[in-house]
Amino acid sequence: MATSVNGRPEWLPDEYEHVLVTREEIWEELDRDARRLFDLTAQEFLRIYQNPPEKYHGDLVFRSLSHLADLIAEPAER
């Protein structure tokens, strides 16, 4: 595990830029990746990501897309 220097992990550069993205940009990325990887639209992915079919259980790629879905899901969907 990386040690920290003055509360900053040592692997971070002294100057680093925060990137802000919009909900629409996240939606577009989710749609693009869900189509490419699972042949699903973003809307279809959002419907199943909290309780995926068994074929996606343990799938690391599915799990990584779930992080995108968490960013754009409505509170009731989380």
Image: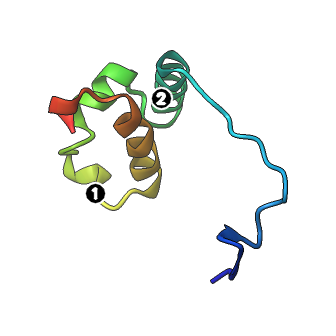
Q: Is residue 69 left or right of residue 25?
A: left
Which class describes the residues within 10 Å of circle 2: few (<14), some (14-19), or many (20+)? many
The local secondary structure at tag 1 comes to loop
Report helix, strand or loop for mark 2.
Answer: helix
Is 27 or 6 nearer to us in this picture?
6
Vertical position of residue 60 compared to residue 65: above or below: below
The residue under the point 67% across, 34% down is 19
State the residue lying farthest toward the right.
14
Say which of 71 and 16 sits in front: 16
* In this picture, residue 13 sits left or right of residue 1: right
Q: Depth check: 43 or 4 in front?
A: 4
Q: Amino acid at mark 2?
A: Leu
Compared to residue 12, the image places residue 74 above or below, namely: above
Residue for badge 1:
57
Q: Which residue is mark 2?
A: 30
Q: Gap between marks 1 and 2, in whole Å? A: 19 Å
Q: Which quadrant does the N terminus fall into?
A: bottom right
